[in-house]
Image (spheres, rainbow, N blue to C red):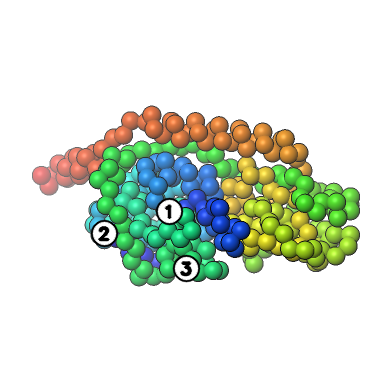
Amino acid sequence: MSILINNPGLFTTVQDQGRYGFQDQGFSTAGALDLISYQLGQKLIGNDGPAIEFTVIGPTIRFTTPNTFVVTGGEFGSELNGEPIEMQSVYKAEKGDELKLGAAKQGARGYIFFGCPLDIPVVANSQSTHTRSHIGGFEGRTLKAQDRIQTIPNDEAKYRVGLSTDVQLVNTDETTIHIVKGPQFDRFSSEAVNAMTSGEYQISEQSDRMGYRLRGSEIPPEESADIISEPVALGSVQVPNDGNPIILLNDKQTVGGYTKIATVTQADLSILAQKQPGETIRFEWVTVEEAIDSLQQLDEALQEALQEIERTPVYQIQQLRSTSKRLNALLKGEA
């Protein structure tokens, strides 16, 4: 059992929730950038298998054996055998079917989950790809044309077909990113602190899964930006000597030697993950207490959505499809 990558799309990798507990050994967490969309997809498909994450332009995949799948994340033009399909809905694919994901209409990242999950080795307690160290995922790299990924049989997969949700927990139109004070906040002048929230920053074309490089008001520290290397957190806003902020993302290094003025709140990381190069964002300072409150509210909304998925009746869509085909044949006088 397998899937075949006909066209890989843009920076398409295998990801799960991340590689935690190994940063002290030099392993980056990697994992899905938009963890909210990842969790929704995992609940819909009904297993713990990893997903295929793609960026801005989606892949084209051929099913060499029957399977089920669901697509979550940003809004992409999605087709199964040339017919439009809905995001956040579980579909059945037959042998030879082709799933095509086009360019992003909204957002930047999408996720494909499979009912018969991808058969990916576990490295340091995770199946996530970290391309810079060439570990995890499918051969430690981005996917390319003609890659064939084996899948694991799952007799329960068919019972998820028809599950869907229209809940939208990640607002791709949101441009405000909330931040709390970083470890070296006191090294920056009040002018730099105010400048950070008074204007817009554009996400540079040089951005990737390691970090978003920003263009806007330069905010260099009052003294050198160089510090003794120390552990860095996901969402750290690092400022080198040129004063241009860099937001560190999942593929970041485990330690860094530049000043960090701020940290993006955990509740806003999925919003940030859905921003494309060229888009603009604004920063807004919040307290740690406010950041915790916003995360709790998001988690409550997510848990409610996940529970609602489990309460949704499952319809055997494959049966409805065959009935629809017979009705179409009758209407055309072919049967």
Q: Which residue is mark 2?
A: 1
Residue 285 visible in the snapshot: yes
Under mark 3, the amino acid is Arg
Figure check: 299 above or below 63: above
Q: Are marks 3 and 2 in contact (CB under 8 Å)?
A: no
Q: Are marks 3 and 1 in contact (CB under 8 Å)?
A: no
- The picture places residue 17, in percent across and down from the top left corner, at 50, 50
Residue shown at the point (42%, 53%) measured from the top left = 50
Q: Which residue is mark 1?
A: 51
SS assignment at label 1: strand
Quadrant location, the C terminus? top left
Residue shown at the point (89%, 59%) measured from the top left = 222
SS assignment at label 3: loop
Under mark 1, the amino acid is Ala
- The picture places residue 208, in percent across and down from the top left corner, at 60, 63
Left or right, 62 with respect to 333, comes to right
Q: Which residue is mark 3?
A: 141
